[in-house]
Amino acid sequence: MRHLMGPLDFTAEELDKLFDLANDIEHNMAKYAHACDGKKLATCFYEPSTRTRLSFESAMLNLGGSVIGFSDAGSSSASKGESVSDTIRVISCFADICAMRHPKEGAPMVAASKSSIPVINAGDGGHQHPTQTLTDLLTIRSLKGKIENFTVGLCGDLKFGRTVHSLIHALMRYPDIHFIFISPEELKVPDYLTDMLKEKNIPYEEVIRLEEIMPSLDFLYMTRVQKERFFNEEDYVRLKDFYILDKPKMDLAKSDMLVLHPLPRVNEISVEIDDDPRAAYFKQVQYGVYVRMALILTLLEIQV
Amino acid sequence: MRHLMGPLDFTAEELDKLFDLANDIEHNMAKYAHACDGKKLATCFYEPSTRTRLSFESAMLNLGGSVIGFSDAGSSSASKGESVSDTIRVISCFADICAMRHPKEGAPMVAASKSSIPVINAGDGGHQHPTQTLTDLLTIRSLKGKIENFTVGLCGDLKFGRTVHSLIHALMRYPDIHFIFISPEELKVPDYLTDMLKEKNIPYEEVIRLEEIMPSLDFLYMTRVQKERFFNEEDYVRLKDFYILDKPKMDLAKSDMLVLHPLPRVNEISVEIDDDPRAAYFKQVQYGVYVRMALILTLLEIQV
Amino acid sequence: MRHLMGPLDFTAEELDKLFDLANDIEHNMAKYAHACDGKKLATCFYEPSTRTRLSFESAMLNLGGSVIGFSDAGSSSASKGESVSDTIRVISCFADICAMRHPKEGAPMVAASKSSIPVINAGDGGHQHPTQTLTDLLTIRSLKGKIENFTVGLCGDLKFGRTVHSLIHALMRYPDIHFIFISPEELKVPDYLTDMLKEKNIPYEEVIRLEEIMPSLDFLYMTRVQKERFFNEEDYVRLKDFYILDKPKMDLAKSDMLVLHPLPRVNEISVEIDDDPRAAYFKQVQYGVYVRMALILTLLEIQV
C-alpha cells in the first residue's frame, strides 16, 4: 500500500503516468464516473482549508465515490486528547482512503505509519503540500505540453512559502529549467535550496524587482507577500508594489507566458489581469481536481 | 446561463412552470431520482442556516446528485481574505451549481457576475431570500389550487422581516389579493411597500390586534416579534400576546384558513396549534424541498 | 415506526436477529451495497463526536444511501431558539432516518415523540449511548461466538461512565455473566446497579487493583480515569497507574482474553498493547459500523 507524503514520493516516470491519467480524465470524464463506486474518502482536516478540502471532495464525487470527514480540529476527537495514530486506525474502519491536513509537521507521516488505508498529506504546517505541487506540475505540462526548457519566475514570499519550496524541489528533476527568484531581501529563498541548485549546476538568479525580468519568463509563479513578514513598516511600503502583478507589468511579458498562483490571492495579482489569456490560476484549480482524481485512482490501484 | 438572485427574477408565467414541475416532483419522486446523477451542488454558507442548507442538500440528493460545501465563514477561504468573486470562480471548478448564503447584501450577485455555474441566492443579509418566497408561493398554490382572490394576513415584525417583504412583492403580481398587516406601531410594514400597493390600487389594511381580523383571513403568515425591536419594555409586555397565535385565536378563523411560518419559530405560534389541520408550516418545509428540486433542474436545464 | 432510545429497547431475541444481520453484512458487504439507495440519513449532532458521527455516516454510505446533517449546535437552528421538537419535524421533511447526539438527557426521546422518521439516540448527555452498547455486544458475540458464561472486568471510571452502565444493564440479560468492577474507591459503580445485580442474584466483585484479577478475566472493558474526578492530587498520583493497561499486566491475562475500549483513549491503554492479538478495541470500531448498518436497515424495515 502506498501513501503520498511529499511531492517527491513519485519518480519523474511515475509522475508522467499520473499526469497522463489526469489528462485522460480531463478529456474523458464520463469514462471515470463510476470508477470509485462504493469507495469512501475521509477528509480529516485538523485546520480549515476549504479549497483543498473541496477539491478532494469534488475529485472523489467525480469518480462516483462518496465523502465523510471533518473540517476543523474542534469537531474531531483530537479535542478529547486522541492521538493521530488512533484517529487514523479508526478512520481506516470508516473509509477507503484519507486526505489529512494538520497544523503539525509530520502528522500525516505518523498517521500513514499506522494506517491500513492510503493517506494523502493535504498539507502539514509549513512542511509539505504535495497535491499543490502535483497540481502546479500538471498545469505546466498540460498548458505547455512538456516540463522542460523553461525560465520560471517565482515571486513573493520565497522564504516561508512551502508551496514555492516544494515546486522548486520538483522542478529540479526536469531538464533545462532556469529559475528566477523575485523577492525582497527579507524573504529570499532559503540557502539550502540555492546550495542544492548550485550543487546540481542548475542556473538561477535572484532579483528584487519583478519588472526587470518579466520579458524573459515562460512561467510566473506568484505568491503573497504578507505585511507581517517585514521587519519594518517603511520597507513594506517601499517594496509591496514591486510584487503586485498588474497590467503594466503584464505588458512586458511574452505573449505565451503563463501566470500561476496557488490561491487564495489577496491583492498580489490585480483583478484586471483575470481575463488576460495568460492568467492560468483558475485553470490551475481545475487541474487540481483532475490530478487528485488521478491520485485517488492510483493509490487505490483502480484501473479504468 | 441563469441565476436566482431575487424572488421576482422569474415572471409569473415562469413561476407557474416551476410550480407545475414542483408538483410533478411531489407526486412522482421516483421519476426524478436520477435526474442529477453525476451533478454536484456546492452549498457556500458564509453564515449558518441549517434549515436552508439542509433543504438544498436534501433536494439535490433526491435528484441523485451530490453535495459539497461549507457551513460557516470560519472554515472558508474568506478568513484568509479571499473575495467572493475568487471563491465562486474556484467553486465553479468543483461543482455544477451553487447555493450561497452571505451576511452581506449583494454578495451572491457579485458571485453570479463572475460565476461559470448557476448561483442561487440562499439569503443575503436583510435583503433577499428568494427560495423562501418560492416556497411560500408553492405552498399556497398547492394547498389552495391557485394564487388569487385571497385575503392574506401578515403578522409580527413587518418592518425588518425580509421574508415578509419578499412575499408582499411576489403576491402583488397575482389578481385580487387583499393584504392585512398585523403589527405593533413600531414594526409596521415600510412606507415604500404601502406606497407601491396604493399605486397599484391593491387593497390593504393595517391593524394592531390579531383577533379582530382572524375571521376574514384565507392565509395567516406569522413571523416572530423580537423583544429587542421594541423601544421600551412596557410596550413589549403590553403587546407581545397580541402576536402569539393560540387556540382561542384559531377558534375565530375560517375552517379552511391556513397558517404559514418561515420557521424557526420560538413562541409566536403555540404548540397546541401544531395538530390543527390548518397549521401548514411543517408542510411548507416539505414544499421547500420540492421547489428547490424544481429550481435546480430548471437552472441546470435538465428535463426529465 | 420504531426508534432506538436506550440499549434495552430491543429484546434479547431482537438483538440476536440484529447481530445475525450485522454478521451477514460483515461477510457479504456487496449484497447490501444498494440496500438504502435513495435513502437519506440526517446526523443531528448538537455536540461534536467525530467518531460516532462518522461511524453512522460510513454505515449509511455502505448501504448506498446518503447523508446530510450538522456536527455542532452552533451551526444549527438551535442557536435561534428552535426546540428539538420543531427541528425533528423539519428534519423529517429532509431525511428518512435521523441519528441525534444531544448534551441534554432525554432530548432524543422528545424528538422521537414528534418525529415522522425513525430517531436513533447517538448519545444524550450522561444518560444513554445505545449504539455503543450494541457495538460492544456485537464485538463480544462475534469474537467469542456467544454472549454467556463470561467473567467480565470493567475498569476505570465506573461512577460516571455511561458506556459502562449501559453495558452492565445489557449484559445482565445474558446467562452466567460474572462481573468484576475495578476502580478507585471514588469511582465505584453506583449502588443502584449493584443493588440490581444482588436482586437478580448475579455475581459480582469490586476490586481496587487491576493486576490481581487479570488471570480470571474473559473480557476487560477499559475506560479512562480522569484526573478531575479525584478528590485530591495524592490519591490520583497513588492510584492512576493501577488503571493503565500495559504489557506486564497483559502477561497476567489468559491467552484468549479480549480487551475492549469505547475510545477515544488517552493513556489508559499503553500503545505497546496495540499489536497484541487480544487487543480488540480497533476491531470494535469496525463492528460499530456493521451494527449501525444493521440498525438502519432494521429501523427502515428494509430487507435484503
Image (spheres, coloured by chain):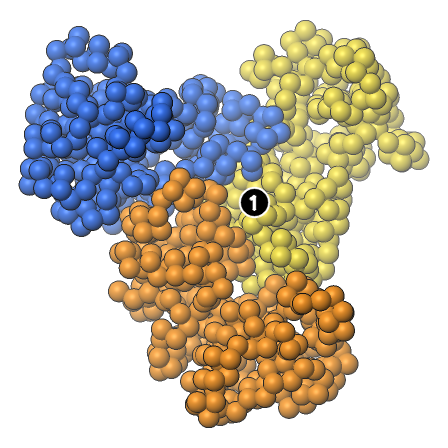
Chain colours: A blue, B orange, C yellow
Q: Nearer the viewer, residue C30 or B286?
A: B286
Q: Residue at x 51, y 41 (%)?
A: C58
Looking at the image, residue A298 sits to the left or right of residue C29; the answer is left
Q: Nearer the viewer, residue A42 or B149?
A: B149
Q: Quadrant of residue A20?
A: top left
> Percent from the top left, x then y, of residue C32?
49, 46
Tell me the SS state at disc 1: loop
Q: In the rendered structure, the residue with mark 1 lies on which chain?
A: C
Q: Residue at x 56, y 72 (%)?
A: B159
Q: Quadrant of residue A188?
A: top left
Amino acid residing under circle 1: Ser
**Residue corresponding to mark 1:** C71
Looking at the image, residue B177 sits to the left or right of residue C239; the answer is left
Residue A20 visible in the current orientation: no
> Percent from the top left, x then y, of residue A238?
26, 30
Residue B129 visible in the current orientation: yes
Looking at the image, residue B67 sits to the left or right of residue B287; the answer is left
What is the tally of numbered marks visible in this picture?
1
Q: Residues within 10 Å of mark 1 (few under 14, many from 20)?
A: many
